[in-house]
Image (cartoon, rainbow, N blue to C red):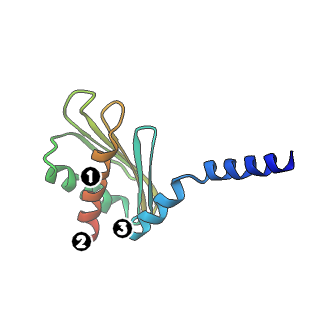
Amino acid sequence: MYKKLCILAVMVSIALTSCAPAAFIGGAALGLGGYKYYDGKLVVIYPVSLEKTFDASISAMENLEYQIYERQRKLTSGKIVTTGSIKDQIKLHFKYNSIEETEVTIRVGLMGDESVSNKIKDKISENLFNK
């Protein structure tokens, strides 16, 4: 009985520590504060101000040839929406975490698309850190 309980405890701890820590460690190597893909959304934390992150995201979307339908930036938040049908639409939401940290949520289409989300994340990072 004790052996089964130990095995169960190990399995639960592995399940709880799945890929999220690896994603945040990998993000640090890219100059990101961290990122994770969950429930059709890619959440990225950039160690850069909201203003700079928003501007780099506008440039990234234009470089990737997406037509921007809506862009809105407030003091502690922002939003970028591309044109297209609901299943093709891309939404980026920005949240101020601190002076030097911004959280960006990327949602591609209705159900999400991890590969396109990562492509957008990489383009934003390129605009922020390769200049």
Judge the density around disc 2: few (<14), some (14-19), many (≥20) Cα neighbours within 10 Å.
Answer: few
The residue that disc 2 covers is: 130
Number of the label disc, if any, that sits on residue 30 = 3
Q: Nearer the viewer, residue 13 or 120?
A: 13
Locate the N terminus and report the quarter of the image it occupies. Answer: top right
The residue that disc 1 covers is: 119
Provide residue 28's location: percent of width, then percent of height.
43, 68
Identity, as a three-letter code, of the amino acid under mark 2: Asn
Q: Is residue 99 among what the camera can see?
A: no
Relative side of 34 to 1, left or right: left
Residue drawn at x 39%, y 49% as measured from the top left: 77
Residue drawn at x 52%, y 54% as measured from the top left: 20
Q: Which type of secondary structure does the marked residue at label 2 adopt?
A: loop
Judge the density around disc 3: few (<14), some (14-19), many (≥20) Cα neighbours within 10 Å.
Answer: few
Q: Is residue 104 among what the camera can see?
A: yes
Relative side of 113 to 97, left or right: left
Identity, as a three-letter code, of the amino acid under mark 1: Lys
Label 1, label 3: how far apart the Cα atoms are? 13 Å
Identity, as a three-letter code, of the amino acid under mark 3: Leu
Which quadrant of the view contains residue 129? bottom left
Residue drawn at x 37%, y 63% as measured from the top left: 49
Q: Nearer the viewer, residue 81 or 115?
A: 115
Question: Comparing marks 2 and 3, which lies closer to the viewer?
Answer: 3
Q: Which badge, 2 or 3, is on the more N-terminal residue?
A: 3
